[in-house]
Image (spheres, helix red, strand yellow):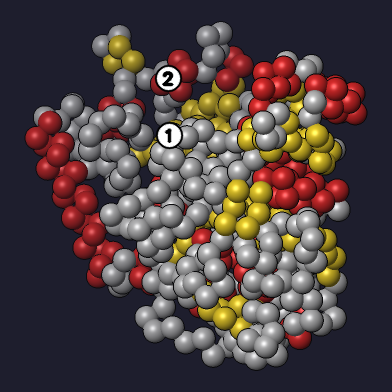
Amino acid sequence: MAKKDGRVQGIEEQKAAAGRITAPGTTGRYLVLFKQGAKAAGVQVLSKKAGIAMASSTDFETGAALGVAEIGGDQGLFFETLGVAVVDTAPQTIQSLSGETADDSLILAVEPERIVYALGNPVSIGVVVPSPPLQNVSAPSTADYFRGYRDAVNHLVDRVLKSGGVQGGADEALSIAAITEAELTWGLQVTNVAISKFTGQGIRVAVLDTGLDLGHPDFAGRSVVSSSFVVGEPVQDGHGHGTHCIGTACGPKRPGILPRYGIACNSEIYAGKVLNNSGRGTDGSILAGIEWAIKNKCDVVSMSLGAPVAPGQAYSQVFEQTAKRALTAGTLIVAAAGNESHRPQVIAPVGHPANCPSIMAVAALDSQLQVGYFSNGGINPQGGQVDIAGPGVQVRSTWPRPTLYNAISGTSMATPHVAGIAALLAEANSHSRGAALWTLLVRGARRLSISSRDVGSGLVQAP
Amino acid sequence: MSKTKISVLVDDENLHRLNDVVKQVKDVGMDVDRVLESSGVVTGSVDPNKLKILKQVKGVSSIEEEREFQIAPPGSEVQ
């Protein structure tokens, strides 16, 4: 234990005393991560090879907190449960240990121990910057702290700009300056669908909408299961909306006429008609469609439909419980956030049933990755969040014959992009369904510098 | 009085006896249109006066009036 004048020395004091130079923001000690199941052997390496006297967290009665502060020269403390050791040793020793991290070695990683600060300090919220260099170990004045902080940030910015690591905003690098849709729609470009090797093979995608033009040439040879929940009307799409959405979610890799517009090109299509040919539907028909999808073990249900809700209005318990039960059964429901907004003046709340927490609500982006003017926002405090965003402005897809193709906009168009990509993810991750599939979608989304109120976790990305 | 279209949610604890719940809501006077087993939802219609009694049937968690959906006409720019 390092003591001076009867008081335990702080880490920086010890380093200063030992004449060791430490990089800004670090303590001069190192963290060593051991392979699972190899902890005992790893600790042996540290003590025998590096001459470090190792104590264990189990040695200390009150836990290891006291032990960490007491680690002095050539000593180490091993956290039994974590399989991590904190060691105090010379950089040269660490160099030779780092060299030990080969494929079959016991040590997985060696890192400098960082200094971290409590959040709530106005300087540290939300921004990661290097710690300002400490001139000496006594607490610097507040003014000195801020000056040092500013110097460190300036230094970092200069370095990054000089190396050409930043070009304008990160989002601009993502978007396309001029849209060329010769081979792929812009939506398939920004979601990385074309470079994905997955096709939704073996995945069942239900689209609950105005049905499908069953004779459209682009769906020839595809597995299509269909059912109408509209009294008096067959599945055959007399509106167009359903055909367009199914095209986006499941359209072919090589359509009759380019560009390619469809995502899960080998998925099994389940076309449920829940909206009539005038585009009208009810809770009853939609719930019946959801039931049918769950019973048929569909992995994804795409619902490009919604009813407006008022600010402050609560979400439907019926749809929330249904969606929860669906998730448990392995069916993920994705729905459009709604188009009642007129940004920037009016941002309407996410509509029903996308406002249910257990239904993934999808917002719409344009080709410059800006939010569509009509796209609703997560303004209601109870549920009503936007979860993710997809391409939803000027989206080309199939349309009933003889028109064949059409480009329209809406959160209705963004939703099947998410559904199609969910199918790709489901194929890529055979054990991930329901809530686990939701997590994959959100985790893989491209973060944007737009508020999550408007885009949730960001732009959906194909695996 | 004309009947109101409703969706009736059955709670988790009574899902196993869904058919009994359906029988009871019918007895109260609900016209049952669909029984959705996987969702645990019963849809149909009922005289609004009976809503209070319906809510008290064992296993009934929520009753909601049916909402309508309407998407924009086919020629619209935003759908």
Work out whether B10 lies above or below A432: above
SS at mark 2 in the image? helix
Toward the left, the furthest residue is: A143
Q: Quadrant of the N terminus of chain B?
A: top right
**Camera-nearest label, 1 or 2:** 1
Disc 1 packing (10 Å; few <14; some 14–19; many ≥20) = few
The answer to whether residue B35 is left or right of residue A64 is right
Q: Mark 1 lies on which chain?
A: A
Q: Which amino acid does label 2 sit on?
A: Glu
Of the residues under marks 1 and 2, which one precedes in the sequence?
A: 2
Q: How many labels does the image show?
A: 2
Q: Mark 1 points at which residue?
A: A312
Q: Residue at x 64, y 73 (%)?
A: A240
Quadrant hosting residue A381: top left
Work out whether B58 lies above or below B18: above
Q: Are marks 1 and 2 in contact (CB under 8 Å)?
A: no
SS at mark 1 in the image? loop
Q: Which residue is drawn at 33% across and 29% down?
A: A118
A336 vs A82, nearest the viewer: A336
Quadrant hosting residue B10: top right
Q: Which amino acid does label 1 sit on?
A: Gly
The answer to whether residue A440 is left or right of residue A149 is right
Residue A75's x, y, as percent? 49, 28
Asked if residue A318 shows in the view, the reply is no
Residue A271's x, y, as percent? 77, 64
Is there one chain holding both mark 1 and mark 2? yes
Q: Name the residue under label 2.
A: A70
The answer to whether residue A406 is left or right of residue A127 is right
Q: Which residue is drawn at 63% across and 26% down?
A: A80
Quadrant hosting residue A427: bottom right
